[in-house]
Amino acid sequence: MKAKLITLIAILLFQNVAIMAQNPTLGTIFNRTSVRSYSDKPVSVETLTLLVKAGMAAPTGMNRQPWEFLVIQDKDVMAKLAADLPYAKMLKEAQAAIIVIGNPEKSDYWYLDCSAATENILLAAHSLGLGAVWTAGYPYESNMNKIATALSIPLPYRPLCLIPIGYPKGENKPKDKWNPAKLHLNNW
Ligand SMILES: Cc1cc2nc3c(=O)[nH]c(=O)nc-3n(C[C@H](O)[C@H](O)[C@H](O)COP(=O)(O)O)c2cc1C
């Protein structure tokens, strides 16, 4: 019984490695993880622009693209935001950050569209060897107001999230979230 289980796990692991070797997109999806510690290596404006471009490639309801992207490299601004935001302390160490900002007047789906853009940015960052993490603006009024005030973001624009970015320091292992019990086939 134990030997069968070990064999099954070995086959599944081998299948995963084989799939990721053949398909770098799936490799990026499965290996991305939130990174909260960064080295001193700078991240170029070209690279940050490429990440924003990946964000803008995301799907949006009725293709409204109700978004703006604000890139910060100013260490003083990042230190102030790190001090103000309770769950974005890693920003102190980051080399840059991207704020994904939605326009609720352009679409009722702004937070969904901006979430799709955020995931694209996180995946693109991982694929380029960068580390990044989604930190919450929306739905917390207090977080959104702190970010908007610090960066002079006018209404009606709302910062969905702030993504600290840098080259990872140390090892960051992806979490294995695969849970077959959550998969329903044909019917609940
Ligand atoms: C909507 C949302 C808000 C999040 N807010 C924060 C945050 O404020 N600070 C933080 O450190 N991580 C935040 N995260 C990252 C999650 O903690 C992380 O994705 C989760 O623990 C799973 O880990 P993984 O990204 O490594 O797979 C947020 C993620 C999402 C999707």
Image (cartoon, rainbow, N blue to C red):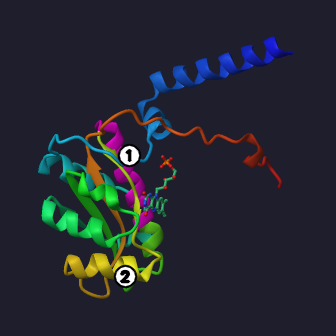
Compared to 70, does 118 lie above or below? above
Q: Which residues are magenta?
A: 114-129
Q: Nearer the viewer, residue 3 or 59?
A: 3
Residue 22: percent from the left, percent from the top? 46, 23
Q: Is mark 1 within 8 Å of ligand 1?
A: no
Q: Quadrant of residue 131?
A: top left
Q: Which mark is residue 179?
A: none
**134 sits left or right of 49 in the view:** right
Mark 1 or mark 2, which is nearer to you?
A: 1
Under tag 2, what secondary structure?
loop
Cβ atoms at labels 1 and 2 below 8 Å apart: no
Compared to 154, does 20 lie above or below? above
Under tag 1, what secondary structure?
loop
Q: Is mark 2 within 8 Å of ligand 1?
A: no
The 10 Å Cα crowd at callout 1, few under 14, some 14 to 19, many 20 or more, is many
Q: Main secondary structure of the magenta part?
A: helix
The 10 Å Cα crowd at callout 2, few under 14, some 14 to 19, many 20 or more, is some
Quarter of the image with the N terminus is: top right
Which residue in the structure is indicated by mark 1?
35
- Residue type at mark 1: give it: Val
Which residue in the structure is indicated by mark 2?
106
Verify whether residue 118 appears in magenta.
Answer: yes
Q: Give the Cα distance between marks 1 and 2.
A: 32 Å
Which residue appears at 21% of the width and 63% of the height? 78
- Residue type at mark 2: give it: Lys
Residue 130: percent from the left, percent from the top? 29, 41
